[in-house]
Image (tube, rainbow, N blue to C red):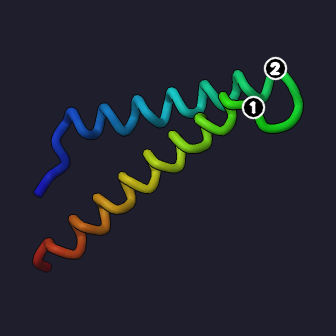
Amino acid sequence: MPLPVTSLYAALAALLVGRVLHARGLGRCRGATNERVWGMALTWLALLGMALWLLAITAFTPF
């Protein structure tokens, strides 16, 4: 059950966009901005999705 290449690219794109948004929001002003919030959300969703996929692979792969 390998991860399709397009799913991997989508997760990496979400991670990259999330980090760029967070950095732009951090550079503009202090405090929470919409860019920082969206950046953090995209980053965590990408990391969580990939972690869950890896757990699913290891749970259903026979030794």
Kind of residue sitting beneath label 2: Arg
The answer to whether residue 39 is above or below residue 61 is above
Farthest-out residue, front: 34
- Which quadrant of the view contains residue 33? top right
| SS state under label 1 | loop
The residue lying toward the viewer, choosing from 58 and 17, is 17
Q: Position of residue 63 (x, y in %)?
A: 14, 79
Q: CA distance from mark 2 to mark 1?
A: 9 Å
Residue 21 is left or right of residue 63, and the answer is: right
Q: Position of residue 40 (x, y in %)?
A: 61, 42
- List the residue tagged with mark 2: 28
Q: Residue at x 36, y 52 (%)?
A: 50
Above or below, comparing residue 23 to residue 44 in the picture: above
Q: Is residue 35 left or right of residue 4?
A: right
**58 sits left or right of 14 in the view:** left
Determine which residue is flagged by label 1: 33
Give the quarter of the image for residue 19.
top right
Residue drawn at x 66%, y 39% as measured from the top left: 37
Kindly indicate whether the residue at mark 1 contacts the one at mark 2 (C-beta within 8 angstroms): yes
When the figure is inspected, residue 42 is found, relative to residue 55, above or below; the finding is above
Please give the name of the residue rendered at 53% of the width and 49% of the height, measured from the top-left corner.
44
Quadrant containing the N terminus in the rendered view: bottom left
